[in-house]
Image (cartoon, rainbow, N blue to C red):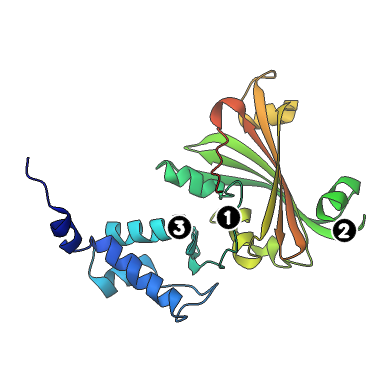
Amino acid sequence: MFSRTPQQQANAPAPFYEKVKQAISHQIATGVWRAHDRIPSEAELVAQFGFSRMTINRALRELTDEGLLVRLQGVGTFVAEPKGQSALFEIRSIADEIASRNHQHRCEVLLLEETQANAVQAVALNVREGTLIFHSVMIHYENDVPVQIEDRCVNAELVPDYLLQDYTVTTPHAWLSLIAPLTEGEHIVEAVRATAQECEQLHIKEHDPCLLIRRRTWSASHIVSHARLLFPGNRYRLQGHFMS
């Protein structure tokens, strides 16, 4: 079998998707594109570089995985806020997790309201009881199978446009990450039993095990949201990536 020498490998031209990544990274590094700027669409990048849509998509996907870009389904691709440090657990949008498996994500919004914080919500958001907050409940599907119930309360003062978004084309996590970039996160993980209503919504039996993640996220020194994320135990695996 013929194999290249190290010198030949070094002189080999970069793959097309790497050229796209380098060009976009250069625009960000030199300040031409700043944090939260929307970059050209895939179609515009195809026209600009003359490469296939698959090539452009791979470049954008890898830059998103590397933390340089944020992609909001149905909205566009934006320059990410620079990260000061790596989180113990990477916090990703469930839509991105599902897409990474080449599966289809769909969201059913059950509740989207302005309300007054009860005692539990007030403690979670570090606000006074009775403060006006936003509250949302939705079910996330993977290939039309329910995989998560998301019950989220949001600090209305920090993100006043939360109720105006279409969460069938983006996710709360993805939108909040763009508007109030994550600087700190907290995960509390429990094994629980779902209520009868939750069992019906998740299409599981009464005694089937579930995994509950209570997630709080901060932007600067303020708590932006608290989410109660309930997964059927046989449809979810918790994975963390650690950096020393």
Q: Quadrant of residue 30?
A: bottom left
Q: Nearer the viewer, residue 154 or 60?
A: 60
For residue 171, above or below residue 76: above
* Number of other residues with Cα within 10 Å of mark 2, as a class: few under 14, some 14 to 19, many 20 or more: some
Report how far apart the C-alphas of labels 3 and 1 lie in the structure: 11 Å
Report how far apart the C-alphas of labels 2 and 1 lie in the structure: 27 Å
What type is the residue that disc 3 sits on? Answer: Glu
Mark 2: which secondary structure? loop
The spot of residue 61 in percent (x, y) is: 40, 56
Q: Residue at x 47, y 37 (%)?
A: 143
* Number of other residues with Cα within 10 Å of mark 1, as a class: few under 14, some 14 to 19, many 20 or more: few
**Which residue is tagged 2?**
127
- Left or right, 152 with reference to 5: right
The spot of residue 37 in percent (x, y) is: 51, 75
For the residues labelled 2 and 1, say whether their Cβ atoms are less than 8 Å apart.
no
What type is the residue that disc 1 sits on? Answer: Ser
**Which residue is tagged 1?**
86
* Foreground label between 3 and 1: 1
Q: Residue at x 47, y 64 (%)?
A: 68
Q: Can you name the residue that lies furthest to the left here?
A: 2
What type is the residue that disc 2 sits on? Answer: Val
Residue 20: image tag: none
Q: Nearer the viewer, residue 150 or 80?
A: 80
Q: Earlier in the sequence, mark 2 or mark 3?
A: 3
Mark 3: which secondary structure? loop
**Which residue is tagged 3?**
66
Q: Earlier in the sequence, mark 3 or mark 1?
A: 3
* Number of other residues with Cα within 10 Å of mark 3, as a class: few under 14, some 14 to 19, many 20 or more: few
Q: Earlier in the sequence, mark 2 or mark 1?
A: 1
Q: Which quarter of the rendered picture does the N terminus lie within?
A: top left
Q: Quadrant of residue 86?
A: bottom right
